[in-house]
Image: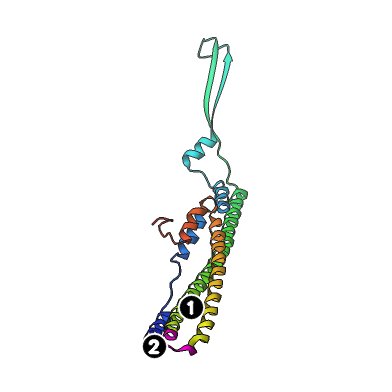
Amino acid sequence: MILQIITIVTVLLPFQVKAWEDDKVLTFINQANPILQAQHNVTRAYDKPDTVTWALRNTSLSGRLGFGGTDFRDTPFTAYGGLQINIPLSSIKEDREKALKLVTEAKETDDLSTKVITDMAQLRTLEAEQAASDVRRKFLKEKAAWLKQRINQGFSSEMNELWAIGGKVNDEDALIAKIDVLAKTQRYKLSKYAGSEWQTLLAYLQGHNDALGG
């Protein structure tokens, strides 16, 4: 009876699931996702250049070579050189295109975040179900061991309950195996959002807490 009470207390204790953090996963995906990276690069192409870049784009050298000299020089040829600076007018169209690119990038980020959060919630559910099933299985096995001890002591009436518990243990084993496959698939699906960095994210989701650094 003491063993049974201890086992029940064990079941009531909170079970643990894999210690990965939602914010870390979401941040890593936002930084590594190839679609978001491409969209960000497109948006950056519409950024206004700094002073040096602006000068290089809008400054040009001009020159001309002539023959016969000038009124002030008797040389047989004349060379002219100059620096030409073009000052473009402010373009409302370019500003509008920049704004549209920012809106598109924000929408892409929001859409991806929604998908990632949904998939993370699904993975959390599977891991919680797996942990709960593991606790139930442990309880049933401990109870089965206690019943075997009772039967060895001569309480043959416990045999039917022992068989029933054996069936429940088998059910939990099958459930855990099923959830394990689903959870692995979900981790793989979630990690693929990170593009070429998917293996790093997968390692983190599998419990390697230092995989993402920090």
Residue 2, quarter of the rendered image: bottom left
Q: Among all residues in the image, which is located at the extreme right? A: 93
Residue 119 visible in the shown view: no
| Quadrant where the C terminus is found in the figure | bottom left
User: For mark 2, what is the residue?
Assistant: 1
- Magenta region includes residue 153: yes
> The disc labelled 2 sits on which kind of residue?
Met
Query: Can you tell which of label 2 and label 1 is closer to the viewer?
Result: 2
Q: Is residue 116 above or below residue 167?
A: above
Which secondary structure dominates the residues rendered in magenta? Answer: helix
Residue 106 visible in the shown view: yes
The answer to which of marks 2 and 1 sits earlier in the sequence is 2
Relative depth, front residue between 54 and 130: 130
Q: Total marks drawn?
A: 2
Q: Is residue 59 above or below residue 186?
A: above
Expressed as whole percent of the image width and height from the top left, the position of residue 128 reads 50, 72
Q: Is residue 79 above or below residue 27?
A: above
Expressed as whole percent of the image width and height from the top left, the position of residue 79 reads 53, 17
Mark identifier at residue 136: 1
Expressed as whole percent of the image width and height from the top left, the position of residue 151 reads 45, 85
> The disc labelled 1 sits on which kind of residue?
Arg
Determine whether the residue tagged by mark 1 lies in a helix, strand or loop.
Answer: helix
- Assess disc 2: are there few (<14), some (14-19) or many (≥20) residues with their C-alpha within 10 Å of its C-alpha: few
Q: CA distance from mark 2 to mark 1?
A: 19 Å
Mark identifier at residue 169: none
Relative depth, front residue between 190 and 27: 190
Determine whether the residue tagged by mark 2 lies in a helix, strand or loop.
Answer: loop
Q: Residue at x 53, y 72 (%)?
A: 173
Q: Which residues are magenta?
A: 150-157
